[in-house]
Image (cartoon, rainbow, N blue to C red):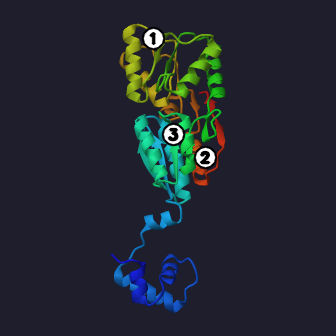
Amino acid sequence: MANIKDIARLAGYSPATVSRAINHSGYVSMAAQTRIDGVVAKLDYAPNEIARDLSQGRTANVGVVVPHLNHPYFTQIFNGILTAAFAAEYNVVLLQSKYDADLERGYLEQLHRKAFDALIFTSRAIPLGTLKRYQKYGAVVCCENPGDESLAATYSLREPAYQQAFRWIKAQGYRRIALTLSRSDELSATSQLTLATYRCVFGELPAPELLKTAVTTFQDGYVAAEQWISQGSSPEFIFSNGDDIAAGIRQCYRDQRMMVPPLMGQENQLSGRLLGLPTITHHFQRVGQAAFDLAATGEIKQIPIPAELILR
């Protein structure tokens, strides 16, 4: 395979002149440019983009760590990152983690080895302190409130919208309220916040039989509703963690020819709009765009984006 030295020998110019001509990075006379272009065409030479990027100290690659794409939280954030990255001419590499801490550490080591300019963690299993230690190798961005950790972060500011939602539900006179969550509060900061806000408004946590975790899809919502029906513990109101999930719950009640409890979704999905469900939009597309901006600039700061309650 030909290299710059081969082109320089055949063209009769120095490797530095050949490099400038190929990369259009400095002055080259018209005669030299024409001669070098001819040799490049004859040898069918193409620059090694990876080597060139590394020599310039960048890869134009941003890795995005996601546990899965079964919930709109991840798909909307990822789409926001893609939109911003495309405009900035960056490549985005999807890195599935399945909440496996070893996989996540492996991606951080790839950052250390310069496979990426930056990593964006949409969610994580490893401690925030571990992310912080790798900032010296490249930008590391998390999509959650990092608290006291000095990390680049952007996230949906959920609590005010959750407070509004639970106060509205309480004002309607509902007391036996069911919740669906993606993960348990032991593993998820979002679940912790949801339950803490619920307790703040209602003075207690929901009854254990009304709380369902590992719910991320339409089918998961359907199964949760089946369990409530079979247990005879049908709630007065259901606060779900996604409009598609709420649609699954609704469909189960309809299939059983039972009255559908009032529902609230999240993420302002098409299903919720078609069904006229009240919802909370967390503006995750904007979170993704802000996450990319932090990854591209390397700036260490926190950008909260307020969530919004939509009543229908």
For label 2, count other residues whose C-alpha is less than 10 Å away and answer few (under 14), some (14-19) or many (20+): many
- At 62% from the left and 53% from the top, the residue drawn is 297
Residue that badge 3 annotates: 122
In the rendering, at what x and y percent does residue 82 appear? 50, 51
- Whether tag 1 and tag 3 are in contact, CB under 8 A, the answer is no
| Amino acid type for the residue under numbered disc 2 | Ala
In the rendering, at what x and y percent does residue 239 appear? 53, 21
Which quadrant of the figure contains the N terminus? bottom left
* Residue 142 visible in this rendered orientation of the protein: no
Residue that badge 2 annotates: 290
In the rendering, at what x and y percent does residue 255 appear? 36, 19
| Amino acid type for the residue under numbered disc 1 | Glu
Mark 1, secondary structure of its residue = helix
Quarter of image, res 154: top right
Q: Calculate the distance from the C-alpha at mark 2 to the C-alpha at mark 3.
A: 12 Å
- At 39% from the left and 86% from the top, the residue drawn is 39
Query: What number is the disc on residue 209?
Result: 1
Mark 3, secondary structure of its residue = loop
| Amino acid type for the residue under numbered disc 3 | Thr
Q: Earlier in the sequence, mark 2 or mark 3?
A: 3
Q: Residue furthest top?
A: 232
Instruction: Please state which of residues 110 and 213 is positioned toward the viewer in this rendering.
Output: 110
- Left or right: residue 265 compared with residue 40: right
Q: Earlier in the sequence, mark 1 or mark 3?
A: 3
Instruction: Please state which of residues 131 and 45 is positioned toward the viewer in this rendering.
Output: 131
Instruction: Please state which of residues 203 and 136 is positioned toward the viewer in this rendering.
Output: 136
